[in-house]
């Protein structure tokens, strides 16, 4: 009897041990609550995430009470996970959605018709003429500042804002137009208030404590911007529906007008609400990411003169000096060094350092770990591009690493993959290519000596990692 009781007890203990072992082995590793709280207000969250990835591996969790964020720090794993349609939920990023469940960045299933329409519109060859028009203005401004030290960052931002505005509304405004400057100012304030308090980068916390974290101010500002977009659409509706000028808004309004299927993304009021949100998404994303990437590229090209010379030598071989570079040069006559410089800029800066938050729409399993419905997922983009196991000297700017090398992985981590992949990838790459090739065909830029002394330019702690302001000496090429 004693032996039997003993055996039963041993069996019971063994069962408990196995259950505990299984439970522990299925628990994602991750930093302790104290460590999370210590780093919650850290200025540079991308560096903290990278440090944690080195300690806890390709997949770890940040768990704070009921809040659980799963962080993916390996390129292939990110692709694998984001390619599954169950991971396309959006964290409740009200800054993008402007507090309404519409538009492409909305939480639920992906509005496929809107995505297809937007990608198709933004990839049209006619977009090039809008970009080239703005580049002409930019080159004129550069010519008038020859021989001077200039701050390029703000000027590039204005040029990109104008291009986007023209593409979206069909109208070109003067660069000091009140309306554009006001919307730009509000969009900047929105991004600033999002980045001022890093706690806002953990949306669940922001929603739990809206006033302390400043979430309440963000929403108020976002609603205010939404009113501006509604007004702009109304004007386009009154003025432009019969206009011959193509524009995103006018084409979108036509889709709404032609839609008679209540299931369609463009149908009636839902279609109109989506247009406002989509406009805000496109403008907000476009005006931050393209100028930042361009500024970083100019910074590195002005700092490393050998890169600038190689790039100009390559341009001279492909494009005669008496005509301006265009997109056809890229496809017909490849410019591998320029493309490699753009890829290296995207890699080293990884400006959208954690992508946009995803949320699981069903219970899932990733590498034996159970991920429950509603879990937040982050792609640790900055770490993937700075992992010393994947890149030799990751902090050194070296376009050569992309010559004759498959650049697909950097591309897919920067712009993401799957159904929620970036909508502005084509237009972003076209603009960066056209601005850089046109600037360096005609001009040289040299970084201010004082700024050259530092190894890298510091990030401003923003949602999108930006360079600090810097000046370059502008001269015309001989
Ligand atoms: C260098 C430039 C850019 C980079 C690195 C970039 C990167 C990204 C990333 C990582 C995402 C998140 C994708 C995901 O959640 O899986 C995203 C989403 C998005 N991007 Fe971009 N982007 C850039 C330029 C642009 C531009 C120029 C536009 C618009 C004109 C744009 C519009 C959007 C929109 C609307 C989304 C949300 C898509 C959705 O939720 O379905 N992006 N982008």
Image (cartoon, helix red, strand yellow):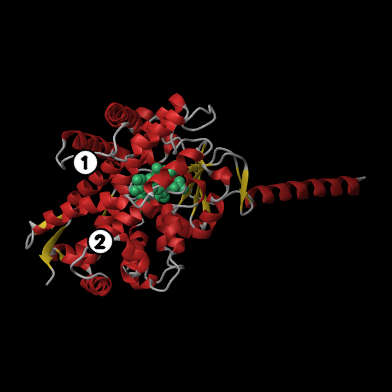
Question: What residue is shown with label 1?
Answer: 172
- Would you identify the image quadrant in which residue 219 lies? top left
Q: In front: 92, or 146? A: 146
Up/down of 264 relative to 85, above or below: above
Residue sitting at x 68%, y 51%: 21
Q: Position of residue 218 (x, y in %)?
A: 32, 32
Up/down of 212 relative to 370, above or below: above
Question: What residue is shown with label 2?
Answer: 436
Residue sitting at x 13%, y 63%: 448
Q: Position of residue 202 (x, y in %)?
A: 42, 40
Q: Secondary structure at mark 2?
A: helix
Q: Secondary structure at mark 1?
A: loop
Sequence-wise, the earlier of marks 2 and 1 is: 1
Does the beta carbon of the residue at mark 1 sit less than 8 Å from ligand 1? no
> Does residue 472 appear left or right of residue 291 in this picture?
left
Q: In front: 260, or 280? A: 260
């Amino acid at each position: 009897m004693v032996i039997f009781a003993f055996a039963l007890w041993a069996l019971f203990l063994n069962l408990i041990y196995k259950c505990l072992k299984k439970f522990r082995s299925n628990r994602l590793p991750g930093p302790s609550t104290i460590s999370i709280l210590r780093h919650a207000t850290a200025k540079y969250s991308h560096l903290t995430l990278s440090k944690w990835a080195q300690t806890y591996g390709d997949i770890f969790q940040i768990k704070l009470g009921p809040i659980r964020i799963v962080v993916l720090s390996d390129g292939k794993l990110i692709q694998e996970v984001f390619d599954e349609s169950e991971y396309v939920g959006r964290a409740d990023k009200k800054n993008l959605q402007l507090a309404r469940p519409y538009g492409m960045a909305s939480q639920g299933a992906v509005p496929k018709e809107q995505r297809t329409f937007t990608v198709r519109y933004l990839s049209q060859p006619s977009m090039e003429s809008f970009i080239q028009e703005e580049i002409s203005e930019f080159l004129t401004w550069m010519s008038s500042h020859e021989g001077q030290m200039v701050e390029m960052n703000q000027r590039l931002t204005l040029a990109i804002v104008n291009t986007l505005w023209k593409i979206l509304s069909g109208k070109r405004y003067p660069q000091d137009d009140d309306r554009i400057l006001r919307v730009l100012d509000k969009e900047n304030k929105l991004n600033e208030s999002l980045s001022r308090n890093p706690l806002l980068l953990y949306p669940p916390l922001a929603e739990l404590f809206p006033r302390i974290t400043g979430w309440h101010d963000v929403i108020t500002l976002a609603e205010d911007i939404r009113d501006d977009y509604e007004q702009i659409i109304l004007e386009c509706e009154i003025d432009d529906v019969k206009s011959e000028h193509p524009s995103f808004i006018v084409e979108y309004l036509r889709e709404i007008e032609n839609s008679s299927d209540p299931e369609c993304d463009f149908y009636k009021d839902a279609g109109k609400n989506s247009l406002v949100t989509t406009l805000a998404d496109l403008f907000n994303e476009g005006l931050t990411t393209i100028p930042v990437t361009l500024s970083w590229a100019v910074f590195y090209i002005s700092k490393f003169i050998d890169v600038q010379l190689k790039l100009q030598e390559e341009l001279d071989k492909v494009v005669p000096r008496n005509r301006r570079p265009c997109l056809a040069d890229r496809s017909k006559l490849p410019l591998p060094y320029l493309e490699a410089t753009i890829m290296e800029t995207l890699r080293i800066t990884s400006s959208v350092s954690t992508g946009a938050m995803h949320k699981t729409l069903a219970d899932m399993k990733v590498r034996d770990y159970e991920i429950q419905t509603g879990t937040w997922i982050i792609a640790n983009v900055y770490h993937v591009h700075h992992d010393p196991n994947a890149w030799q000297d990751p902090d050194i700017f070296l376009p050569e690493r992309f010559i004759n090398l498959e650049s697909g992985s950097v591309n897919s981590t920067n712009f993401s993959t799957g159904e929620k992949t970036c909508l502005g990838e084509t237009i972003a790459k076209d603009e960066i290519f056209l601005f850089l090739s046109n600037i360096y065909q005609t001009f040289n830029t040299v970084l201010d000596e004082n700024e050259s002394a530092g190894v890298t330019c510091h990030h401003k702690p923003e949602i999108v990692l930006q360079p600090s302001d810097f000046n370059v000496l502008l001269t015309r090429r001989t």
